[in-house]
Amino acid sequence: MSYYKAETVREAASGNWLFIVSALAPHAEEALKRPGKHVACPIHGGKDGFRVFKKDFLETGGGYCNTCGPRHDGFELLMWLNNWSFKETLAAVGEFLGVEKQLTWKEKKQQQNNARPQQRQRQVACAGGGAAQESVIPIPATPHVQPEPEPVQDGAASEDSKVIPLLMQKSKPWLMELQEEMERRAERQRKYSARLHEKITQIWEKECLPLSSECNEPVRAYFQNRGLVFRWNRIEESDSLRVHPALSYFDEDGNEVGKFPALVCAIRDKAGQVITLHRIYLTQTGKKARVPEPKKMMPVPDDLKVTGGAIRLGEPKSGIIGVAEGVETALSAFKATQIPTWATVSATLMEAFEVPEGVHTVLIWADKDKSLTGQTSAHALEARLKQEGIKATVITPKLPIPKNGKGVDWNDVLISQGTEGFPTAQRIYASLFGGYAYARA
């Protein structure tokens, strides 16, 4: 039975996922109308449990459920939205796009057999009552003539461009407007990415200042509000936190909203190279700036990857480090234990964290989420590191999640319980190494 080739359907779907998902999963339209924004989950309900990816949805079709985690492309998304198998999803997308089906080997063989010339000429000669003899006269093959291509009339679509007009006819007006806006946004992003290395270097090397600079008051107040008051000398060793006195904030259309004080964090790869920057926009009094996304990561240059990287908050001590999602969470763990703890920015990046050379033990300070996202990523990292021969353990807050909250992290523990809410370094190392003596620095 003929089938859709996955590679062919994927190629045809790239750039068309807005139309595809709208047609095959109309219950996700609220998210499609607001790409990148949290809306009610089409599966679990609620108010803000789901979003489609803003930057590359047209190309990939991915989205994120706060309960179930990421759906990396449109096929995964439709499988989840409609409870389909991959085969069902591939068939639905292929049929919608009008992709030509592939013949099975058996069908191809049958087609060849049907097309094979069956004509034969027989000549029977009887000589003196002798037995009849059969002679086969071969029929010469007809030379193959390449047919003349039909002229394309003005306004007619070529074979490679038929999909888009077809989708346009099937789509709703708002889809066309959104498609065009997303394409314009993607083009702006491509132009921005072309000079991204230069932009990152400009901000980090020429505009940012050390934490010890005089313009640090907004950042100092922000940390103080989070219970993070301590000596910063060990954190500054890794040079991953700097201050920007007035960093421009741009909305999703590329318009400058204003300039704000900011904590700028360098995300470094396994070798220590700066990949990109994570920014926390603040007010002069140390609150989060009143902008749509006060915490924003800059795009990643095309020749680099952020997966595996982290914000290095201190240097490894005796081959041991901690990891946490947020900068505030990582600094909370460091304050309580004096064990250098790095921030991965998100649960997804935590799961992919790559341990630098010389580290043999990793303490994973997990976020405790109602969705189980933080715990799941932490345990996934733990399992992978153990397979790589690295000692790892997950430490989860015992603090209960508030009734109306989404979760708690170790900074919440620090604020509500102080360092007493953390296991001591001695206790951690005793459980890991069976009585290993650890002296606080």
Image (tube, rainbow, N blue to C red):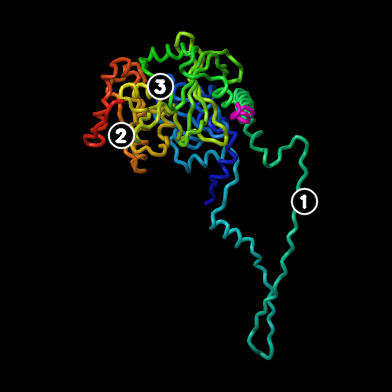
Q: Quadrant of residue 404?
A: top left
Q: Position of residue 312 (x, y in %)?
A: 43, 28
Locate residue 15 relative to residue 212 in the image: left or right.
Answer: right
User: Of callouts 1 and 3, which one flags the residue occurring earlier in the amino acid sequence?
Assistant: 1
User: Of callouts 3 and 2, which one flags the residue occurring earlier in the amino acid sequence?
Assistant: 3
Can you identify the residue that label 2 sits on? Answer: 393
Q: In the structure shown, which secondary structural element does the residue marked by tag 1 occupy?
A: loop
Label 1: few (<14), some (14–19) or many (≥20) C-alpha neighbours in 10 Å: few
The mark closer to the camera, 3 or 2, is 3
Can you identify the residue that label 3 sits on? Answer: 233
Looking at the picture, which amino acid does disc 3 mark?
A: Asn
Is 387 in front, or is 85?
387
Is 99 in front, or is 305?
305
Tell me which residue sits at (64%, 37%) in the image: 163
Tell me which residue sits at (62%, 27%) in the image: 192
Tell me which residue sits at (57%, 47%) in the image: 101
Instruction: Give the Cα separation between the discs numbered 3 and 2.
Output: 27 Å
Can you identify the residue that label 1 sits on? Answer: 148
- Asked if the residue under mark 1 is in contact with the one under mark 2, i.e. CB atoms within 8 Å, the reply is no
Label 3: few (<14), some (14–19) or many (≥20) C-alpha neighbours in 10 Å: few
Is 11 in front, or is 233?
233
The mark closer to the camera, 2 or 1, is 2
**Magenta residues (range):** 191-198
Give above or below for 149 relative to 106.
above
Looking at the picture, which amino acid does disc 1 mark?
A: Glu
Instruction: Give the Cα separation between the discs numbered 2 and 1.
Output: 69 Å
Split into 4 quadrants, where in the image is the C terminus? top left
Q: Position of residue 129 (x, y in %)?
A: 66, 89
Give above or below for 136 relative to 371.
below
- Asked if the residue under mark 2 is in contact with the one under mark 3, i.e. CB atoms within 8 Å, the reply is no
